[in-house]
Amino acid sequence: MAVVEKTVPGVHNAPANALPPVVALLGNPNCGKTALFNRLTGARQKVANYAGVTIERKEGAFNSQAGHTYRVLDLPGAYSLTAHTPDEAITRDVVAGLRRGDAAPDVLVCVVNATNLRLNLRLVLEVQRLGLPMLLALNMVDVAKKRGVVIDTARLSQELGMPVVETVAVQPGGEKALVAALDTMLPLPQVVTKPLSAIDAVSVEETQREVRRIIAAAVSGDDEASSTSEKIDSVVLHPVVGPIILAVLMFFVFQAVFSWAATPMDMITGAFEHLGAVLGEYVPEGHLRSLLVDGIIGGVGGVLVFLPQILILFFFILMLEDCGYLPRAAFLLDRLMGGVGLSGRAFIPLLSSFACAIPGVMAARTIQNRRDRFVTIMIAPLMTCSARLPVYALVIAAFIPSREVLGIMNLQGLVLFILYVAGIVSAMLVAYVMKRTMGGKGKHPLMMELPAYHWPHLRNLALGLWERAKIFVTRVGTIILSLTIILWALSSFPDAPEGATQPAIYYSVAGIIGRGLEYIFAPIGFNWQICIALVPGMAAREVAVGALGTVYAMSQTGDELANSLAPVLAASWGLPTALSLLAWFVFAPQCLATLSTVRRETNSVKAAWFMAGYLFALAYVAAFLTFRISTAIIGG
C-alpha cells in the first residue's frame, strides 16, 4: 500500500517512503536552464499552464544511476525574486511555496551561465537567504574555457556555501555531475524556509559587492570574446553609426527577399502550372476539375510560391539573432522607443511579431510595467508578420516593375522595405497616443544582457529554417487548404441561372457575400472579388492570396486562366486599388488566433475587441486616403 506523507508548509521532509523529491531549475533567462531540463527529462515531460495564468509550466521526471527518481520543474527565467514581471512572479511564488496546488520544491538547482557570473550570481545569493537546500549548476563551462575564463569550482563552492557542479547542457552526458550531486544530498534534511521578506534583508548594492568579491576570489583569466565584443560594440552601438548600420542591414535584407527568391519562385510557379495543365487535360470538365484546378491548385499553389521569400527573410533574422546582434538592435532602438514612452525591452516582442503576432504578444510578459506591456501587445500586430508577405509580394509583383533604382537597389525590394517601415512607424505613433491617453509618460530604463558575438551555428540556422518551413507548409496543407476548399464550394454553388451574363461565381454564395461587402469597401477601391478574399483572410492572412487565386480563376470569362495570378490582377485592378490594398494590409485587423491570444494574455475580452476595432479603423482610413490621393494624382 502506498504511503503518502503530509507536507507541512515551509518544511521539507524526505523519508524513504515519500514521494519523489521535487527539483526546481532556477536561473536567469538564456542560461541554458531549459536545455538542461530537456537533457534530464528527455521525453518524460509534460507542458501545461500555471493555474490562473497563461505562463507555461514544464514538469518532467528522471531516474539517476543510483535508482533514485526525481520530479523536475523548469521555472520561468528570472533576474530576481523581487518580481517585476509575470514570469518572475510565478518563479517567486513557486520557490516560496505560495502557489495553491503546487508544493514547494525540495531542492533548488540554480543554473548559471559560466560566461556571465557577474549577472547570474545575484539571483543565487537572493535565493540562498530563504534557507532552501541548494545546488549550483555551472552551465556552459565549455564556452567559458574556450574564452580563457578559469573558474575554481572548489573555491566557488566554498564562497557560496553550497555544492557546485559543472554542466554542459547541450552535450550528451553533460548532466551526469548534477545528477550524481543530487544523489549525494539524499536523504534531504528537514528545513524550515524563511519568509520572502528575508530577501530584502540585504540591499541590492551589498549583494552586488558580494558578487564582485566572490568572482574576484574564484574566477580568473581574460575573456577574449568579451574584449572583441567590446571593440565591435564601440562601432555597432555608436549613437550615429549604429542606427545607420541597422538601417543598411534591414534594407539589404528586404532587397534580398525579392532578388534571391526570383529563381526558386519561378520554379515553384512552373511546377504548379504544369500540374494544373496535366489535371486540366485528364480530368473532364465539371465540378471535380474546377475543385482541383481552380480551388486547390489555384489556392494552395498561389500561397506556397512565397515560401522562398519567407525563408530568406527568416534566414537573416535567425542569423542576426544567433550571432548576438539583435539585443544590440534593442539598445539602438531604446532611444526611439523612449520617445513614445516604451522601453527597448519591447523590441524583442515586437521583433517576434515579424514572424507572427502570437509569439510577440506572449513575449510581452517580460516587460515589467503593466501599462507598457498592454501597449506593446496592442502594437505588436502592426509589425509585418510573415503572413502578410505573400500578399505584399503578389501585389508588388503585379504592379511594381522589377527594375533598378539609382543602379544599386531593386524597386520591388524598396517598396517592400517601405511597407515594413510604415508598420514600424505606425506602431510608434499608436504607442505614443496610447501612452499619453493612458497617463504613462515615464520612460523605463532598459536592462538587458548583451551576449558576446560569435559566428552563427549552421545547425541552429538549419533547424530554425526547417521549423519555419514546416509551420508554413503545414498551414498551407491544413488551414489554407481547408479554407480554400470551403471558399471554392461557396464560390461554386448555386450554379449560375440560365442566360447569365456574369461569371458563375457572381451568382454564388461567395459572390453574394462579396457584393454585399462591396458597399462597405467600395470607397477604398475594393471590388467584390477582393471583399470575398478578405473574409477567409480573418483566419490566416496568407489565405487572402489563395482566395484571390480561386476567385479570379473562377471569374475568368475566357476559356483559360493566365499563367499566374499577378498578370490577372494587373489587368483587373487600377494602381490606386493595388496601393489601397497594400495600405489596408499594413493595418489589417488580426487573425482570430491572435485575438484569442490577446484575450488570454490580458485576461480581457475588451482588449481583444479594442485591438480588432482600432486596427480596422486604421486600415480603413489608411486605405481610403491612399486610394483617394493616388486616384487624384495618377487617375483610376
Image (cartoon, helix red, strand yellow):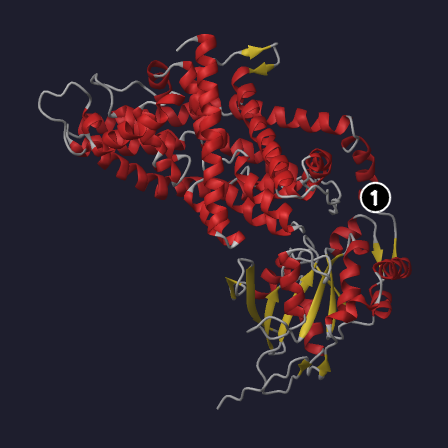
Mark 1 falls on what kind of element? helix
Judge whether residue 272 can be spotted in this image: no
Judge whether residue 221 can be spotted in this image: yes
Q: Amino acid at mark 1?
A: Glu
Q: How far from the left and from the top, in percent, is residue 588?
A: 46, 33
Reply above or below: 604 against 510: below
Q: Residues within 10 Å of mark 1 (few under 14, many from 20)?
A: some
Residue pictured at 59% horizontal, 85% vertical: 18
Q: Nearer the viewer, residue 601 or 397?
A: 601
Q: How far from the left and from the top, in percent, is residue 176?
A: 67, 67
- Asked where in the image residue 563 lies, by quadrant, the reply is top left
Left-right relation of 592 to 228: left
Left-right relation of 4 to 186: left
Labels in figure, total: 1
Residue pictured at 69% horizontal, 60% vertical: 83
Q: Quadrant of the C terminus?
A: top left
Reply above or below: 560 against 224: above
Residue pictured at 49% horizontal, 43% vertical: 610
The residue sitting at the bottom extreme is: 1
Q: How far from the left and from the top, in percent, is residue 29?
A: 68, 54
Reply above or below: 411 against 521: above
- Asked where in the image residue 579 lies, by quadrant, the reply is top left
Reply above or below: 186 against 588: below
Q: How far from the left and from the top, in percent, is residue 53?
A: 54, 60
Give the residue number, with chain letter if any, for mark 1.
224
Residue pictured at 68% horizontal, 36% vertical: 337
